[in-house]
């Protein structure tokens, strides 16, 4: 299993998550994209999905609901096959938040309840 402690470029990954949770979505996207570029296989697709979440929420923050809806749908597809906890993230919880947020976007609702990434404690 991959954890944030094992990902090749964990500094951009960890910093990207920190920026994401500060709702600095454009900056988070930049950091996460750096980690994504360095990866292959399942970690690469996972990082692509997380990066897409940051992009979608950046679109939302700038009023681009159509872009947010579209990119978030792709992100959810990319993250759908991963376990509940992956790469040190409570991914099941994040997917649930993202599905709810996406449904609100589709229905035209606005939300102050922006998804957050919750980290899992590392296995010892």
Image (tube, grey):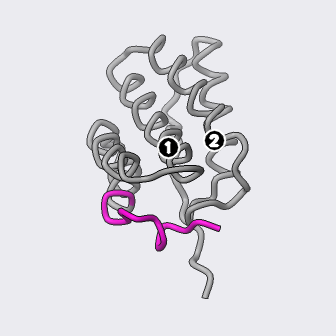
- Dot 1 surroundings within 10 Å: few (below 14), some, or many (20 or more)? many
Which residue lies at the image location 52% right of the left edge and 53% below the top edge?
A: 117
Residue 96 vs 15, above or below: the answer is above
Q: Which label's residue is closer to the chain start, 2 or 1? A: 1
Using the rendered view, name the quadrant where residue 121 is placed: bottom right
Residue 75 percent coordinates (x, y): 56, 32
Q: Residue furthest bottom?
A: 124
Dot 2: element: helix
The front one of 64 and 81 is 81
Residue 92 percent coordinates (x, y): 70, 51
Q: Which residue is mark 1?
A: 50
Residue 55 vs 62, above or below: the answer is below
Dot 1: element: helix
Confirm or deny contact between disc 2 and disc 1 (CB under 8 A).
yes
Which residue lies at the image location 64% right of the left edge and 53% below the top edge?
A: 91
Residue 123 percent coordinates (x, y): 62, 81
Which residue lies at the image location 40% right of the left edge and 31% below the top edge?
A: 55
Q: Is residue 81 left or right of residue 39?
A: right
Residue 113 vs 22, above or below: the answer is above
Q: Residue furthest front?
A: 40
Marking on residue 79? 2
Q: Which range of residues does the magenta coloring cover?
A: 1-13
């Amino acid at each position: 299993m991959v954890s944030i402690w094992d990902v090749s470029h964990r500094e951009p990954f960890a910093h990207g998550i920190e920026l994401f949770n500060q709702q600095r979505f454009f900056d988070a996207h930049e950091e996460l994209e750096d980690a994504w570029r360095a990866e292959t296989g399942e970690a690469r697709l996972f990082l692509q999905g997380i990066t897409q979440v940051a992009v979608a929420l950046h679109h939302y923050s700038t009023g681009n609901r159509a872009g947010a809806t579209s990119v978030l749908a792709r992100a959810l597809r990319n993250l759908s096959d991963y376990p509940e906890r992956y790469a040190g993230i409570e991914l099941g919880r994040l997917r649930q938040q993202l599905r709810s947020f996406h449904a609100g976007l589709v229905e035209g609702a606005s939300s102050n309840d922006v998804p957050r990434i919750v980290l899992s404690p590392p296995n010892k």
